[in-house]
Image (spheres, helix red, strand yellow):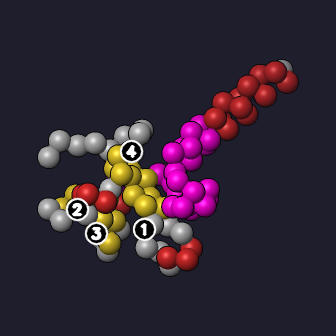
Amino acid sequence: MIRTIVVLILTAYAGVVFAHSFYPQECCSGADCDVLASSRVQITPAGYVIDGRETIPFPLAKWSPDENYHGCFPKAMMGKVGCFWAPQRAY
């Protein structure tokens, strides 16, 4: 029983570690980045619009290794996106 609980905890922890493993320290300080729901991202001719208010030009978006959108919102930037990752898409 204890072995099963330990395996479940380690499995859950491994998913969290992977999610933060590719975020550079300068973007998130290990805490300010997370997966973004695709509903928060709109693709426009100018780039990715986050939450309807901030545009990330295509050349500034990094490729997401897990096919999800990710964003870093450092507290010092007061709600603005520090770094942004997007799934690869054919344009």
The answer to which quarter of the image holds residue 28 is: bottom right
At a point 54% along the width and 61% down the height, the residue shown is 26
Residue 58 - label: none
Residue 47 tag number: 2
Does residue 42 show up? no
Q: Label 4: state its secondary structure.
A: loop
What amino acid type is highlighted by mark number 3? Thr
In-image side of 14 versus 74 (left or right): right
Residue 62 location in percent, x, y?
36, 51
Q: Residue at x 45, y 66 (%)?
A: 82
Dots 3 and 2: beta carbons under 8 Å? Answer: yes
Instruction: Examine the structure image and report whether residue 83 is included in the region drawn in magenta.
Output: no
* Residue 79 spot, x, y in % from top left: 47, 75
- For the residues labelled 4 and 1, the Cα–Cα distance comes to 15 Å
User: Of label 2 and label 4, which has the lower sequence position?
Assistant: 2
Residue at the spot of label 3:
55
**Percent from the top left, x then y, of residue 39?**
33, 56
The mark that comes first in sequence, 4 or 1, is 4
Determine if the magenta segment contains residue 20: yes
Q: Which structural element holds mark 3?
A: strand
In the picture of the structure, the residue carrying the numbered disc 1 is 81
Query: What's the distance in space between the residues labelled 4 and 3, CA to CA?
Result: 17 Å
**Label 1, label 2: how far apart the Cα atoms are:** 14 Å
Left or right: residue 38 compared with residue 5: left
Disc 4 target residue: 64
Residue 71 against residue 18 in the figure, above or below: below
Res 2 → quadrant: top right
> What span is in magenta?
15-39
Q: Residues within 10 Å of mark 2 (few under 14, many from 20)?
A: some
Q: Farthest right residue?
A: 2
Question: How far is mark 3 from mark 1, CA to CA?
Answer: 9 Å
